Amino acid sequence: MHYDIKDINLAKRGNLRIEWAANNMPVLQLLKRRFANQKPLKGLRIGCCLHVTTETAVLMQVLKSGGASPVLCASNPLSTQDDVAASLVRHLKIPVFAIKGEDTKTYYKHIKAVLTSKPDITMDDGADLVSTVHRALNNKNFNIIGGTEETTTGVIRLRALAKQGRLRYPVIAVNDAQTKHLFDNRYGTGQSTIDGIIRATNKLLAGSKVVVCGYGFCGKGVAMRARGMGAQVIVVEVSALRALEAVMDGYRLMRMSEAARLGDVFVTTTGNIGVIRKQHFILMKDGALVANAGHFNVEIDIPALREISRQKRRIRAFVDEYLLKAGRRIYLLGEGRLINLVSAEGHPAQVMDMSFANQALSVEYIVQNHSKLKPDVYEVPQFIDEDVARLKLESMGIQIDRLTPQQKRYLCSWQVGT
C-alpha cells in the first residue's frame, strides 16, 4: 500500500483520538452498522480530498464498512492531523497522502496520488480534487460516476464549472444541505474559529473589537461566538440582505475602510478573494490580529501585506508578525489559512456527525441514481436531510410531534379558509 504521511509511529495516539471523536458521532455510528450489513458501496473506489481530522477518520470507517475502498489526501496544506493520518494507514489500511505543513507542490502531488487510484466517486472539500480531474489532459481516462462537495467555496467553483458546460459528472453539494450549513457552518465554524484564534494567540476577546467580514452562516457563527466571549462585534458585508440581517441581529455594520481603523481582531468568512487589502492594512492599528475562516488563503491579500512591510518574523507557532514600513505591527494568524484547523482541531465531532452523515448518504444516493443524473451540481435530496436531522434528534434522546392525518390533508388542500 502506497502512502505519504509524517510518521507512522504516531498511529497509537491518533487511534485514541479517533475513538473519542467516534463516541461523539452517533449518527455516523448508526450508518456504520447499516452499511456493514448492507454493503451499499461494495467494490467502489472513493477518492477523498478532505481535512484529515479525527472526524474525517470516522467517515472513512463508515465508507469502508459499506464496502468501499477510500483513498485520502488533505484539502488544505495546514489542516492535517498527522497522528490521525498515521492511524488511518496503520489501523484501517487506508492509503493517506497528507502531511501538516506540506508545500503547494506536495499538496498537488498528493491529490494526483489519490487520482492514480482511478476513483469511481470523488469526495471533495474545496473542489481542488475535482478541478485537478478537469484540468488533467487524460481526464477522459477517468470513469467517475459522481461526487460530493463539502464546502461553500467548492460549491461556488463547481457551479461555475457547470455553468460553462464543462462539469463532466454529477456532484452533490453537501454544503447546501440544511443539516450541514445551518449547523456545521454556523455552530462548527463559529466555535472552532474562536478556538483557533485563542489557541494561536492566548488573547482576551472580552472588550476587544472583532470585525467579521461576511455574514453568511459562517460569519453568523463567528459573530455570535465572539459576542458571547464579550467582544464588540462589527460586521462588514456586500449583500444588502445580509447586512440588514446583521443590523437586526444587533451588530454594528460598516464598510471595511471604517472597520479597519477600529478592529483589534479581523476574521474573513466570505469565500471570496481580496477581502482585506492593502488600503485596509494601512489603516489598521498597531497589533491588529488578522485571521481567515474561509477555505482558501486568498481572502487576505498576503502579497500586499508583504509589500508594505519591512520585516516579517514568526513570533508564535501560528502567528507571523509583519512590521509595516510605517512602524506598526500586524499579526497574521495561520498564514492566512483556515485558522480553526491550523491552530485548533476544526469543528467539534458532534456537528461534523451531521455533515459527514450527509456525505455518506449522498455517496449511497449517487450509487443508486447516477445513471439518471446529468453532469450538474445537485442539492442533497430532502429525504436525506430529514433523515439526518431525525437520527440526530434520536441520538440526543429528543422526540418531536408528528402531523395528524387531518393536518396532512389540510396542508395539501385549498378549500378550507376563513
Image (spheres, rainbow, N blue to C red):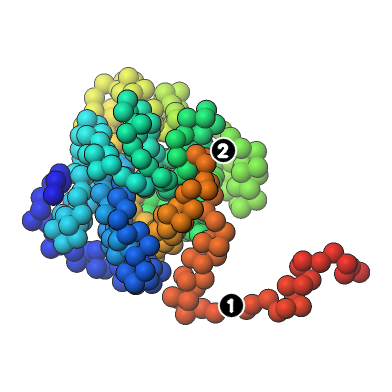
Q: Which residue has dot 1 on it? A: 400
Q: Secondary structure at mark 2?
A: loop
| Foreground label between 2 and 1 | 1
Query: Where's the C terminus, which quadrant?
Result: bottom right
Near-viewer residue (45 or 27): 45
| Residue name at image x 65 percent, y 42 percent | 241
Q: Is residue 97 visible?
A: yes
Outermost residue to the right = 418
Near-viewer residue (248 or 161): 161
Q: Position of residue 68 (x, y in %)?
A: 30, 57
| Residue name at image x 13 percent, y 58 percent | 90
Q: Earlier in the sequence, mark 2 or mark 1?
A: 2
Q: Position of residue 359 (x, y in %)?
A: 41, 55
| Residue name at image x 85 percent, y 64 percent | 414
Q: Secondary structure at mark 1?
A: loop
Q: Can you tell which quarter of the image residue 10 is in? A: bottom left
Q: Which residue has dot 2 on it? A: 237
